[in-house]
Image (cartoon, rainbow, N blue to C red):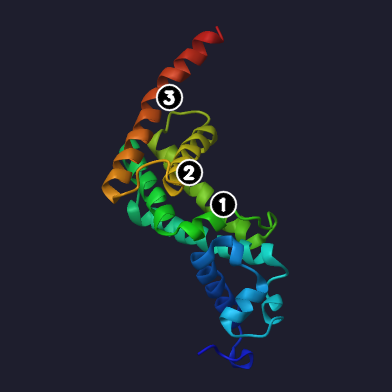
Amino acid sequence: MPQASGSYHHGDLRAACLSAARDLLEEDGGAGLSLRAVARRAGVSATAPYRHFQDREALVSAVAAEGYRELTGFLAAAHPAPATPDDLAAVAVAYVRFAIEHPALFRAMFAEPCDPDNEERVLATTVITEYVIGIVRRAFPDSEPTDALATAVWALVHGLAFLHLDGKLDASTPEIVADQVRAAVHAMLVASPTAAQMAARSSE
């Protein structure tokens, strides 16, 4: 049974709203997500969610921040200290697997309108960005600039995640997904030195 709004203790209402928002996302995607819908699902008054969220974008930003933190933990669990290209590929597989296992949350994190200045969201995205840069720095200590390579790696893996989510790549089994992701990551890493040499020759 839904709880009455007066039964919430400090901090519980926000958590209940976020849980309700995530349930709604899983059921109907972003189309069914609103502060009123969250209030109904959480069993509180229509105005209660506004105590913590100014509008829908603020709510989505908070959900996204939760997703970024969970994704960071998921990647760290896939490999505690990635330091080689093979380790990087393993983390890439975990990234895509997270997207496939949490499609609605993943889309909310990256495809739903949100508040770009939301402090919680900014902090969470900063953590995962630094995590990706750290992996690339350890896997390719001699590569410069590291930030550009990290962006390229992230763009590739992120694109693979959405290609699988959108049915453009075979996601029928975890093994097929893992093979496709590893192959794509290794193909990019093998090609990168050649591309760098060509760029160097063209600038001479």
Q: Are marks 2 and 3 in contact (CB under 8 Å)?
A: no
Identify the mark at residue 72; answer none if there is no mark: none
Separation (CA) of disc 2 from disc 1: 10 Å
Q: Which residue is mark 3?
A: 192
User: How many numbered marks are there?
Assistant: 3
Which mark's residue is nearer the viewer, 3 or 1? 1
Amino acid at pointer 1:
Phe
x and y percent of residue 39 in the render? 63, 79
Foreground residue, 118 or 123?
A: 118
Q: Which residue is mark 1?
A: 110
Q: Are marks 3 and 1 in contact (CB under 8 Å)?
A: no
Q: Residues within 10 Å of mark 3 (few under 14, many from 20)?
A: few
Instruction: Answer above or below: position of 53 versus 116.
Output: below
x and y percent of residue 194 in the render? 41, 18
Task: Identify the residue shown where x is 60% and y is 57%.
Answer: 123
Amino acid at pointer 2:
His
Foreground residue, 83 or 44?
A: 44
Foreground residue, 1 or 94?
A: 1
Amino acid at pointer 3:
Ser
Pointer 2 or 3: first along the chain: 2
Q: Residue furthest left?
A: 175
- Answer whether residue 84 is visible to the viewer in this image: no
Q: Secondary structure at mark 1?
A: helix
Foreground residue, 106 or 185?
A: 106
Determine the image quadrant of residue 140.
top left
Q: Quadrant of the C terminus?
A: top right
Q: Which residue is mark 2?
A: 158
